[in-house]
């Protein structure tokens, strides 16, 4: 079981009862603006299963984020091994997704920093992050984390001409 505490947040392993709030977040068009589409409840359930499986297999993963003061589910943050083909394949990505009501409060940066602070113990020296070009909120989080913009690429999982095809790539070296 994972439990990482920050001044305002708890990052933790997923619980079965997280699914309703997780699915509601993934169904929100505001939250999913820079993804191909919102997720159905069944897609969220399958996604949550994959997150749990990856965490068990890798020894790191994407965790549930809750507010310490009241235990409210805010979203997810964590590390993920890139699975799509291309030059990023098998690199470790940091990502986050928060309920729209949790935006603008510094939660994404706080949670992501807690994950990055624990990469050395897992032998991870470099972490990437990427998002659609228009997702300036996430790019600002990447910058606050000290990540450097290193390029752009067409996301291989999206078809040519898709409005979210072009992505920006950030990277941070964490070797001590």
Image (spheres, helix red, strand yellow):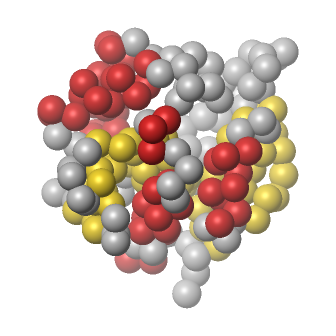
Judge from the rendering whether residue 118 lies leftward or rightward of residue 165; answer left or right.
Answer: left
Residue 41 x/y as whole percent: 33, 14
Residue at left offset 29%, top offset 22%: 45
Query: Can residue 103 be seen from the camera position used here?
Result: yes
Depth order, front residue of 117/122: 117
Q: Quadrant of the N terminus?
A: bottom left
Camera-side residue of 70 and 107: 70
Identify the image quadrant of residue 50: top left
The location of residue 6, given as percent across then percent down, is 34, 69
Q: Which quadrant holds residue 86?
A: top right
Q: Is residue 156 left or right of residue 105?
A: right
Q: Position of residue 116 (x, y in %)?
A: 49, 68
Query: Which quarter of the figure has residue 125?
Result: bottom right
Q: At which x and y percent is residue 52?
A: 27, 40
Q: Which residue is located at x 70 percent, y 63 percent?
A: 143
The total number of labels drawn is 0
In the image, farthest residue toward the bottom? 176
Residue lying at 35% horizontally and 57% vertically, measured from the top left: 60
Image vertical order of residue 84 relative to residue 11, above or below? above
Residue in the foreground of this view, choosing between 57 and 142: 142
Q: Of residues 75 and 82, which is closer to you in this image?
A: 75
Instruction: Name the residue at 70% across, 51% down.
Output: 139
């Amino acid at each position: 079981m994972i439990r990482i505490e920050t001044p305002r947040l708890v990052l933790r392993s997923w619980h079965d009862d997280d699914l309703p709030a997780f699915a509601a977040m993934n169904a929100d068009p505001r939250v999913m603006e820079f993804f191909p589409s919102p997720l159905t409840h069944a897609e969220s359930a399958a996604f949550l299963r994959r997150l749990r499986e990856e965490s068990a297999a890798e020894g790191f993963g994407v965790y549930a984020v809750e507010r310490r003061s009241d235990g409210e589910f805010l979203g997810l943050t964590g590390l993920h091994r890139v699975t799509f083909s291309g030059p990023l394949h098998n690199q470790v990505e940091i990502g986050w997704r928060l309920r729209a009501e949790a935006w603008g409060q510094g939660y994404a940066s706080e949670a992501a920093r807690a994950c990055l602070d624990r990469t050395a113990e897992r032998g991870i020296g470099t972490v990437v992050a990427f998002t659609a070009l228009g997702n300036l909120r996430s790019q600002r989080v990447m910058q606050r984390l000290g990540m450097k913009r290193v390029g752009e690429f067409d996301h291989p999982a999206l078809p040519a001409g898709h409005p979210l095809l072009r992505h920006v790539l950030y990277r941070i070296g964490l070797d001590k």
